[in-house]
Amino acid sequence: MKPLFEGFKSKVKKVACEEKIQLLVCKYMKLQYSDVIFICDIAAGLNLGKKWAGVTKASRSSRGLPDIYIFHQRFGVGINYCGLAIECKSGKESIYKKDGTLKKQKAVRKNSKGQVVEEFDHLAEQASALTKLRAQGWKAEFGEGFDQIRKLIDEYLKGN
C-alpha cells in the first residue's frame, strides 16, 4: 500500500476528507515553504471525548475558525496582508449555490443525553470568522479541495 501523501500531483482525490487534505497541505507547506511558519487546527474536526472537547472549546474564541493559518506578511501595490487563513473544504461538492451565495450547512450540538441543545449554520459561522479576519488584515478564504488550497497558498506566498 502506498503512503497516502505521496507526491503532490493534481490527481489528489477531490473527495478526500478535510482532515486528509489538511495533513496533505501541512506536508506540502513543509516541503515547499519550509521557512514559513504555519499552524493547522486539525483537532477542530476530530470527534473528541467530552473532556478534550471542553478543553478545545475553552481554548478558542468561537466556533468557525479557519483550519490553517500561515503567518507570513505580504506587502505590495494594493496588497497588505498580515497572513493567510484558509477554511478547508473537501471539494466533494461546492459550498456555493449556483447564484454564488453560500449554501446552508445545518449543524447541531447535543448534550450528554443526546438531546439537541443548539442548531446553527456551520458555513455561515465559518464565513463570519473569515470576514472578521479580513477586517483585521488577513487574506482569509474558503479552499475547496487540495488543488484549490495549494493554488491559494502558492499565489499568496509567491505573490502571483
Image: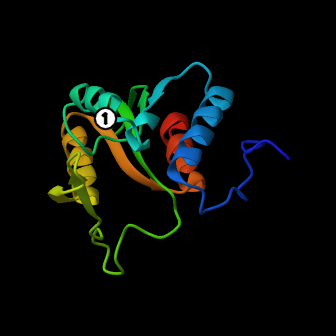
Q: Amino acid at mark 1?
A: Lys
Residue at (52, 41) in percent of width and height: 153
Question: Quick one: SS at disc 1?
Answer: helix
Q: Residue at x 39, y 37 (%)?
A: 48
Q: Could you say which quadrant of the image residue 46 lies in? A: top left
Extreme residue in the front direction: 113
Give the answer, above or below, for where 58 lies relative to 125: above
Other residues around mark 1 within 10 Å, as few (<14) / some (14–19) / many (≥20): few
Q: Is residue 76 left or right of residue 114?
A: right
**Is residue 6 found left or right of 58 in the rendered image?**
right
Asked if residue 65 shows in the view, the reply is yes
In this view, 103 is above or below 54: below
**Residue 86, position as x, y percentages in the image:** 41, 43
Pointer 1 residue: 50
Q: Residue furthest bottom?
A: 98
Residue 91: give x, y in percent of width and height: 52, 62
Q: Nearer the viewer, residue 41 or 36?
A: 41
In the picture shown, does residue 90 fall above or below 83? Answer: below
Give the tally of numbered discs.
1
Horizontal and vertical percent position of residue 100: 32, 73
**Residue 2: % across, % down:** 84, 45
The vertical placement of 121 against 160, above or below, is below
Looking at the picture, tell me which residue is in the foreground, 27 or 56: 56
* Residue under the image location 25 percent in, 34 percent down: 137
Question: Which residue is most to the left?
Answer: 117
Quadrant of res 56: top left
Q: Residue at x 31, y 80 (%)?
A: 99
